[in-house]
Each structure stands twice: as C-alpha cells, then as structure tokens.
Amino acid sequence: MTSTILIDQDLCNRCGICSVVCPVSIVDPADETTLPAVRDANAGSCIRCGHCEVSCPSGALLLNFCPDEKVPLPAGAGAVDPTELAYYLKKRRSVRHFTKDPVPKEKILGLLEIARYAASAGNGQPVAWIVVHDPKDVKKIAGLTVGWMKTLLQSDHPMSGYVPGLIRAWEQGTDVVCRGAPHLLVATIPEDSPVAQTDAIIALTHFDVAAPAFGIGTCWAGFVAMATMSYLPLREELGIPQGRKCAYVMMFGHPRYTVHGIPRRKPLEIAWK
C-alpha cells in the first residue's frame, strides 16, 4: 500500500507534533528507532486535511496526496494586521447596485480557489459550484423566481402575503430578485448529506469575505435560493445535477458605489460562562 505520509529522515526531529495534531489520531509518533508513520490498517481513515504536514516545524513530513502540487509558504505570508482586518470586515456591504461590467472568469476562479479551502465536516469538501456568468441568464433566473412567487399567492406559505409587492415591482421593471447583478454563484451539495448545508454556507462566506479584495461586491440571493427548493423550472434552468440540491445562491458583480464609512450595529450580546 502507498504510504499515507512521506518522511524526510534527515529533517525529522521526532518532535511528535504530527501525531498530536492529527484529528483522527492515526499518525504513530516517532521514537528513538522509528519515524512517524500511518499503519496500513489506519490509512483508510485519513481525511487528507494536511494538519500533519503543515504543522511540521522542520518540513520533514509530506502528506502523500497530490505531493507534486505542494506550494511553499513564503515567510510571513498571510500575516494580517488586526486593525486593518477589522476595518476590512466591517466595511463589507451587501451590494444591491452593480455596474454592467462583467467579472472576468479568471477572477471568479481566483475567488473560488480561496473558497476551496473552506472548512468542511471531516474535510469532506462536498460543495460544487454553478456560475451563471451571462447576465441574460441571470435575468431569466430572476424571472423564474418571480414565477415561483406567483405560485405562493393565496397559499399558506409564510411569504404569501409578502410576494404581491415583489411581483408588482418586477412587472413594473424593477429587478427585486437579483438586483441587476451580472452573475450568480450557486453552491450545490449532495441531497442526502446531513452536514453539507453548513459546509456550503462556510464556503460561500469565504467567497463573500474575499470578494471585496478582488473589487467584487456580493449579496446573498435568498429569493432564488428559496425558489430552487421547490420550483422545478428554476432547478432545471440552473442545471442542478441529479442527486444534488442548491444549498444557497449569491449574486455578485462590480459594485456601482464605493463604501466611505462603517454603519452602526446592535450592541454585542455575550454570556460568559
């Protein structure tokens, strides 16, 4: 069987950190005569999270998963000033006014590459993406979402009393669904997973938080997300594969306006135990 981890015996100082940080406790620690190892009987339990590799202070350990793709981490990379980080996050706005300039696919891929590293249960990484890039298709999806709203009229759905105003605004030419956004991002997950919904929200949040650094504005598209749960024409238009479902939808594009301040928020509510 192929080794789960590869050890450079000249670099390994037998500190034992790799064994301690393994979340599934399958890395046997080194001793005076042996190096750290994963026994064949435990290899199937490896979730390929990489904690062992990135926690090795001497760089002696390599997780044997796509080893040729390993990229060295430059010294100081990722260090962020706490004050600047606070300003960055507090400035983040839900954008509802976009320019017509399309976001290049290369920039979208860069953001999704960041979202690929979001936490997921057991490192399962269950999220797959559908990017609606053509603004005409976004407009069609908005129209289908309004079609779903019309099925709620005079029903017992919680939104039945709310949708008439939305439908009326749409018919008068206002996009109350996608807000004129040029693009949509749809996160899909396996239908039978009990935890993938949370994984998808975490991944979408990575996209959402990183977007302003790329000059991109985002807004969570709740109406579209709700409609995909039960409206087959919309699900078919999005091309959601069999066996998967929409976890949530995000609209995005270049924001029309610039943020010049930070709004107030409710006071923190904290219970210290």
Image: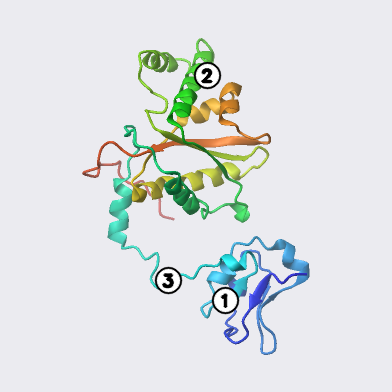
Residue 229 x/y as whole percent:
58, 28
Q: Earlier in the sequence, mark 1 or mark 2?
A: 1
Tell whether 198 sits left or right of 135: right
Between 52 and 159, the one nearer to me in the picture: 52
Residue in view at x 47 percent, y 19 percent? 146
Between 135 and 143, the one nearer to me in the picture: 135
**Quadrant of image for the N terminus:** bottom right
* Tag 1: amino acid: Ile
Residue 259 x/y as whole percent:
25, 42
Location of residue 251 with respect to 18 vertically, above or below:
above
Residue in view at x 65 percent, y 64 percent? 24
Q: Earlier in the sequence, mark 1 or mark 3?
A: 1
* Tag 2: amino acid: Trp
Residue 28 x/y as whole percent:
68, 76
Q: Is residue 3 visible?
A: yes
* Label 3: how many Cα within 10 Å (few below 14, some 14–19, many 20+): few
Residue in view at x 54 percent, y 12 percent? 155
* Label 2: how many Cα within 10 Å (few below 14, some 14–19, many 20+): many
Q: CA distance from mark 1 to mark 3?
A: 21 Å
* Tag 3: amino acid: Pro
Label 1 sits on a secondary structure element that is: helix
Tell me, yes or no, whether the two marked residues, 2 and 3, touch with CB atoms within 8 Å. no
The numbered mark at residue 17 is: 1
Residue marked by disc 3: 74
Residue marked by disc 2: 148
Q: Is residue 206 visible?
A: no
Residue 76 lies in what quarter of the image?
Answer: bottom left
